[in-house]
Image (spheres, helix red, strand yellow):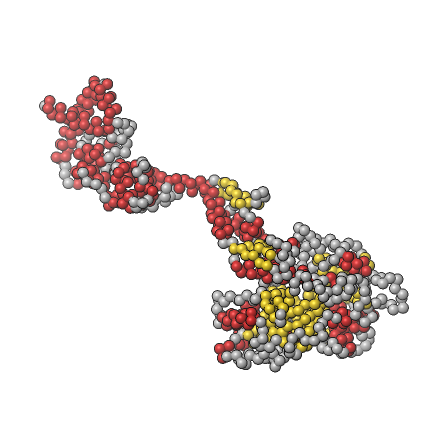
């Protein structure tokens, strides 16, 4: 009996000793002891992270206490062993498993799983676990990282791996997966190996990453992003729209901080991180280029910002010789910026103040001696255009000179019946130096005496209706209604102010009132390329007169026009000539070439003789020599001509509209004699129209050549536009006749064009009439009479009825 008690005491002593020596994350040697002695109690709730040396020291210091505890434990163990053996003999089968689970002491913790028992058996047998054994510890499902139980299950899984495997075994698993990984370093702790297995091999998110993401989603922070001026411009987008979209997209507040230039962003950490990635991506996509302007003069400071906004590219002058640097997010915008900068430089150099004239009618009562040369007073009024003003104008404010002396009286405006108008030649035409000149002599003074090149030449005179506007200079580009010259003044004072201060003006074409509500007819669509010749800065004004002398603006131009047919017409029959059927249209809105190609028109209108561009089909190169492959092409006609044109802006402050007179001396360039750059462009454009005709969605319109050489001169692209032209025969009463005289109404042939600039995306409308015979006195007076009728017609407000007695009654 004493031997049996001693055996139980030794067994209990060995179990207690193991409990003292094993740390909290125990290896499988202790687990094997638990498995073979399930009825032995162990107090696992107490701290066990001590060494075996400390337990031995405690036993040596307190031998009596240790013997007492061992004796009590031996007695308790004996009772449990006896009771357990009796119960195990009484029950069997399934009840034996329930008895085994129920008999497992609670103080030993949860009963080990089959995986743990298998690993314990491997440890007792001296065998090493494999990756398959490691995968058996992997849970079947991964909890959601945002769920509250994720951290609990993560820590429990780390504890399981640390209890199941040794440090060396965990490291071996990582090396077997990827020996070159930094997770396999020998200086890491056991817990780190277990965490690496869970995160690297089992793709569980790290607790640190989850905590960081949670902090990023909840904490508000402030971050600054240093930017340059070009980067800031491209990040802003047009009118700041792109930066505003970023602010809404990431729910952040963005502010500009100067010195150093940077974007100060306030928002959640997660949003700041994503925004930083997008800003970095935008900076990486920025491309830049350097360009030498053909005029070799820098771009005006007031045009830098306007060109940048139109082209979507940041522009800056880097030298006084006309070298500019451009930044953009795509190469297409760089090409647009080059064209706009070249045109702006050309317009600035060619803007001559002496190309402006002013017309003042005679007094109504011829017998009344005039007190002064200009008895009426005039003022500068703000001008509001129904369409956007040309981008080459200063946008801070536009003003027009108008007569104000009889503004509220019944006789406002010029009475053509009394004054005779331009055709009567009773009024006077002045230069800015207040010198009287003849309109026809002024217009034809700078035209060459002979043709520009070999071939037949022709001279055409045209008049365009519109307004001569004076713009102000504002450093901040702020719009203002305050005119640069205030008050009512004599017209001579206004002319002197314009001449002395070198005031710039621009002619803005517009439609007269007689065709605003008419339906356009004889319509056709044209793709027009207009080139202007440039010269060196030294010789730019060598042939010009001084400011006090009268002269017209002279330009050498080269024009190439491509007439387009409707897709339905081109697919059904051969290309029509200029005598095709006339079909009205109800739209004068400008469209791009792609939009014009996609629209359906019933016919291609016949052409009108308004210049060399409107020659008959027999004079133009015929398309009948083209191959059968191009019979269904949308291109019906090609015309190219070059010449010299002079322009004069005529201010008429006593009338609702001003006008521009143009005289053109031109010659036709035969087919095959065009510049090589234009021939290559036509080939590309023809391929583009064929794709549009086949409803190809990915068709991209080619870019025209920016500059070309012809006849020993260099030309730059001035206009690349899609033009919708229509012809109107307008019938209106002759205002030059005295009341009571019956006569046939006048019939005026008007050519109206709706122009869409393909580079600046601006749309405009213009109206022009042509002089049938400028060499005869009768033909010239008839032409000026038509100009009088169109420029003197006034707008009538809605709700006004005109009675037979010419009295206006407001409804």
Q: Is residue 581 visible?
A: no
Q: Position of residue 25 (x, y in %)?
A: 27, 34
Q: Position of residue 477 (x, y in %)?
A: 66, 52
How many numbered discs sit on the rendered protein?
A: 0
Q: Which residue lies at the image location 47% right of the left edge and 45% below the top edge?
A: 273
Instruction: Please state if 414 lies on the left or on the right of 282 as rendered.
Output: right
Q: Which residue lies at the image location 50% right of the left edge and 79% below the top edge?
A: 627
Please identify the quarter of the rendering in which residue 94 is found.
top left
Q: Position of residue 28 (x, y in %)?
A: 22, 36
Q: Which residue lies at the image location 80% right of the left edge and 68% below the top edge?
A: 437
Choose between 104 and 747: the one closer to the eye: 747
Q: Position of residue 382 (x, y in %)?
A: 72, 57
Q: Which residue lies at the image location 19% right of the left edge and 40% below the top edge?
A: 127
Choose between 673 and 410: the one closer to the eye: 673
424 vs 104: above or below:
below
Q: Is residue 455 visible?
A: yes
Instruction: Please state if 225 lies on the left or on the right of 736 as rendered.
Output: left
The quadrant the C terminus occupies is bottom right
276 vs 152: above or below:
below
The quadrant the N terminus occupies is top left
Please identify the quarter of the rendering in which residue 24 is found.
top left
Please identify the quarter of the rendering in which residue 419 is found.
bottom right
Instruction: Please state if 172 lies on the left or on the right of 256 as rendered.
Output: left
């Amino acid at each position: 009996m004493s031997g049996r008690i001693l055996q139980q005491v030794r067994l209990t002593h060995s179990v207690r000793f193991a409990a003292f020596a094993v740390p909290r994350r125990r290896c499988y040697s202790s687990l094997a002891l638990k498995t073979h002695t399930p009825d032995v109690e162990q107090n696992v709730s107490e701290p066990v992270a001590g060494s075996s040396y400390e337990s031995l020291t405690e036993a040596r210091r307190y031998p009596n206490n240790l013997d007492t505890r061992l004796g009590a434990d031996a007695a308790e163990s004996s009772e449990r062993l006896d009771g357990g053996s009796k119960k195990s003999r009484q029950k069997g089968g399934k009840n034996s498993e329930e008895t085994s689970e129920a008999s497992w002491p609670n103080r030993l913790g949860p009963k080990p799983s089959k995986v743990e028992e298998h690993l314990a058996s491997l440890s007792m047998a001296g065998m090493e676990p494999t990756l398959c054994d490691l995968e058996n510890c992997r849970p079947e499902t991964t909890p959601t990282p945002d769920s509250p139980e994720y951290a609990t299950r993560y820590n429990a899984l780390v504890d399981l791996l640390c209890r199941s495997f040794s440090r060396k075994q965990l490291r071996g698993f990582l090396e077997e997966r990827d020996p070159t990984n930094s997770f396999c370093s020998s200086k890491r702790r056991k817990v780190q190996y277990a965490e690496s297995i869970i995160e690297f091999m089992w793709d569980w998110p790290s607790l640190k990453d989850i905590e960081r993401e949670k902090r990023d989603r909840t904490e508000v922070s402030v971050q600054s992003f240093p930017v340059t001026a070009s980067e800031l411009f491209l990040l802003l987008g047009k009118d700041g729209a792109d930066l505003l979209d970023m602010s809404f997209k990431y729910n952040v507040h963005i502010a500009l901080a100067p010195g150093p230039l940077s974007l100060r962003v306030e928002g959640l950490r997660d949003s700041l991180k994503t925004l930083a990635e997008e800003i970095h991506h935008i900076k990486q996509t920025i491309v830049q280029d350097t360009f030498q302007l053909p005029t070799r003069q820098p771009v005006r400071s007031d045009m830098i910002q306007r060109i940048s906004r139109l082209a979507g590219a940041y522009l800056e002058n880097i030298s006084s010789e006309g070298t500019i640097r451009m930044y953009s997010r795509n190469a297409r915008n760089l090409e647009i910026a080059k064209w706009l900068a070249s045109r702006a430089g050309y317009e600035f150099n060619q803007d001559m103040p002496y190309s402006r004239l002013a017309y003042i009618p005679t007094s109504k009562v011829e017998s009344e001696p005039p007190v002064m040369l200009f008895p009426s007073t005039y003022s500068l009024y703000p001008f509001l255009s129904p369409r956007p003003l040309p981008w080459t104008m200063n946008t801070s404010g536009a003003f027009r000179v108008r007569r104000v002396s009889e503004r509220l009286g019944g006789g406002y405006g010029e009475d053509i019946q009394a004054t005779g108008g331009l055709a009567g030649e009773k009024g006077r035409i002045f230069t800015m130096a207040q010198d009287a000149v003849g309109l026809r002599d002024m217009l034809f003074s700078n035209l060459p005496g002979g043709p520009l090149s070999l071939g037949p030449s022709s001279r055409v005179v045209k008049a365009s209706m519109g307004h001569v506007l004076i713009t102000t200079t504002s450093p901040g580009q702020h719009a203002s209604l305050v005119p640069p010259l205030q008050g009512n003044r004599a017209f001579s004072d206004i002319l002197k102010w314009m001449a002395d201060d070198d005031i710039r003006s621009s002619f803005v074409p517009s439609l007269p009132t007689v065709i605003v509500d008419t339906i356009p007819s004889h319509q056709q669509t044209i793709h027009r390329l207009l080139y202007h010749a440039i010269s060196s800065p030294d010789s730019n004004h060598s042939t010009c007169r001084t400011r006090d002398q009268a002269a017209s603006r002279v330009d050498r131009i080269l024009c190439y026009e491509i007439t387009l047919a409707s897709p339905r017409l081109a697919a059904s029959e051969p290309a029509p000539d200029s005598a095709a059927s006339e079909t009205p249209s109800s739209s004068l809105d400008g469209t791009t070439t792609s939009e014009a190609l996609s629209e359906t028109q019933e016919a291609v209108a016949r052409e009108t003789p308004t210049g060399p561009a409107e020659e008959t089909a027999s004079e133009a190169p015929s398309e009948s020599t083209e191959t059968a492959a191009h019979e269904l092409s949308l291109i019906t006609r090609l015309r190219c001509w070059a010449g010299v044109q002079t322009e004069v802006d005529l201010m008429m402050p006593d009338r609702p509209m001003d006008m521009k007179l143009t005289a053109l001396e031109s010659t036709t360039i035969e087919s095959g004699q065009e510049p090589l750059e234009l021939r290559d462009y036509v080939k590309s454009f023809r391929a583009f129209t064929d794709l549009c005709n086949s409803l190809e969605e990915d068709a991209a319109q080619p870019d025209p050549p920016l500059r070309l050489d012809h006849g020993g001169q260099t030309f730059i692209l001035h206009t690349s536009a899609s033009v919708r032209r229509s012809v109107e025969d307008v019938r209106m009463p002759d205002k030059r006749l005295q009341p009571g005289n019956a006569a046939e109404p006048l019939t005026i042939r008007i050519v109206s064009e709706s122009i869409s600039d393909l580079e600046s995306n601006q749309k405009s409308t213009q109206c022009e009439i042509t002089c049938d015979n400028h060499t005869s006195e009768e033909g010239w007076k008839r032409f000026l009479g038509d100009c009088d009728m169109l420029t003197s017609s006034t707008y009538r407000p809605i709700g006004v009825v005109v009675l037979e007695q010419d009295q206006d009654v407001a409804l």
